[in-house]
Image (cartoon, rainbow, N blue to C red):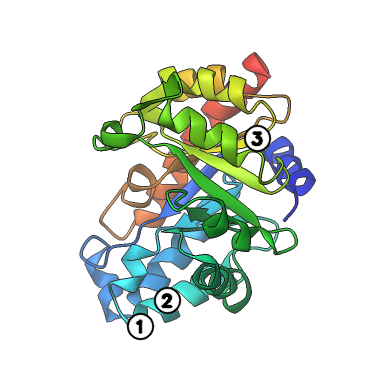
Amino acid sequence: MNRDLLFKQIQEKSSYLCVGLDTDPERIPRHLLREKDPVFAFNKQIIDSTEQYAVAYKPNIAFYEALGPAGWESLQKTVEYIPDHLFTIADAKRGDIGNTSRLYAKAFFETMPFDSITVAPYMGKDSVTPFLGFENKWVILLGHTSNPGSMDFQTLQVNNQYLYEEVIRKSSEWAGPDQLMYVVGATRADKIKKIRELVPEYFFLVPGVGAQGGDLEAVSRLGFNDHCGLLVNSSRSIIYASSEKDFAAKAGNAARALQEDMSDFLNQFL
């Protein structure tokens, strides 16, 4: 998917919602465990109930890898079920030497038809550029994350600036805003303004709104650019809105509530 098509979805739906499919078999409604593929059965109903409000879906690959071959099968069926006009993110946080990264990219861009993959930049340019060699596929680079341990390295001083700022500045030389995005945690809203100044044209994937307590209003006000420039992810607060048989309807309600707030902020700030 290219940038124009992504922005078109945002405009048509008045939404920049990404639904995180962090599907844990221990948390899905018990009645689904009778299904041949409980994870896919859950994901399918979540997608059906939320797709009118979302512009993107983000399976966290760890939840599927942990299930072995059955998990990979569930993941494959899930990404193939998501409608083609919606943006898909493999939240895999890969990043290794060139040949290995190339195979990771092939796995998620060819074997599985994801539009994008999250990538860790610690090993530098040659670990990232193999992911950039696929037409209409995106790299979403870890920029400034929300986890407590992010303070261990990301805010160290390098050349009179924070390390995360140097990572973003340097990596923006590797690809333009039609192919590269950045992960910026919602609970670091105070940093979003600074990062937006560093890379004004790039999209941000913003996790942490919902169960993690990120402020959607602050994220939107500080993070918007002329093309919205945000994909705000919510996982648990949507997909686990209910643990009963009404889980899909409740997920749809939660997604709609976020979309309505997003519509207001698009009108207010954009």
The location of residue 121, given as percent across then percent down, is 47, 49
Are the two marked residues, 2 and 1, in contact with CB atoms closer than 8 angstroms?
A: yes
Q: Which of pointers 1 and 3 lies earlier in the amino acid sequence? A: 1
Per the image, the residue denoted by label 2 is 74
Q: Residues within 10 Å of mark 2 (few under 14, many from 20)?
A: some
The residue lying toward the viewer, choosing from 238 and 24, is 24
The residue lying toward the viewer, choosing from 5 and 204, is 204
Per the image, the residue denoted by label 1 is 70
**Could you tell me which quadrant the N terminus lies in?**
bottom right
The location of residue 181, given as percent across then percent down, is 59, 42
The location of residue 87, given as percent across then percent down, is 62, 54
Q: Answer above or below: position of 141 versus 49.
A: above
In this rendering, the label closer to the viewer, 1 or 3 = 3
Tell me which amino acid carries mark 3: Tyr
Disc 1 and disc 3: Cα gap in Å? 36 Å
Give the residue at x 46% y 59%.
95
